[in-house]
Image (cartoon, rainbow, N blue to C red):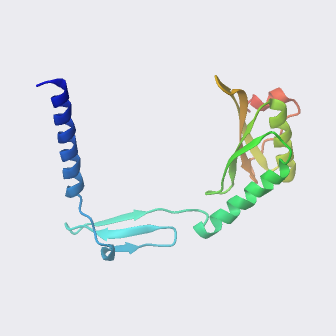
Amino acid sequence: MDHQMMTRTVKAASWLLGAALVLSCHLKPESEIEQVGSGGGRRANNPGGTEVVEQWATITPASQLVPVTESAANRLQGVMTGSAVRLEFVNCDVPPCVTRLQAGSLAEARASLKAISDSYGGRVSFTARENLDAYTGQSFQLDVVLDTDQTRAVPEADEELLLTD
């Protein structure tokens, strides 16, 4: 058997095995799935009589998640207007909100962090990292926790950003 024929045989066997696995699953009609709670979940009965329960929860209700995240992002963008620091993301799924900033220099990172800290009355915490990339060069990443009780003061010197407590 040549290499090409063996490859086709292996692909066909893999496809048949995958199809058999899919067909062996017991799919339930929608009427047999019961929604549970406001956070999310479902309950289904298996043919063997056992009950399967899948549940998940979100701290912030989904209806409030987008406005909270947008509000935090808008507040950050307002504080960082005119800055070269980029806002990578804001995540408010679980309070407090967490954001990531990307800066080209430590001075830019510290200045933005100081402005954010002032905006939140000092109720921020952060972790700073240096990134070295062959294409983009040196940059600095800041993971900032907003409106938190576990605060970290913004240092006076740029180099102290990278130090951990």
x, y percent for residue 16: 18, 46
Q: Is residue 121 visible?
A: no
Pick the residue in front: 47 or 138: 138
Residue shown at 87% from the left, 29% from the top: 157
Q: Quadrant of residue 143?
A: top right
x, y percent for residue 43: 36, 69
In the rendered view, does 144 fall on the left or right side of 25? right
x, y percent for residue 30: 33, 73
Q: Is residue 96 visible?
A: yes
Pick the residue in front: 85 or 47: 85
Q: How many marks?
A: 0
Residue shown at 84% from the left, 30% from the top: 158
Q: Quadrant of residue 87?
A: top right
In the rendered view, does 91 fall on the left or right side of 20? right
Residue shown at 84% from the left, 50% from the top: 79
Q: In the rendered image of this protein, does residue 46 appear above or below residue 147? A: below
x, y percent for residue 14: 21, 41
Q: Quadrant of the C terminus?
A: top right
Q: Quadrant of residue 85?
A: top right
Q: Quadrant of the N terminus?
A: top left
Residue that lies at the very extreme toward the left in this rendered image: 1
Q: In the rendered image of this protein, does residue 151 appear above or below residue 57? A: above
Pick the residue in front: 164 or 64: 64
Residue shown at 14% from the left, 24% from the top: 2
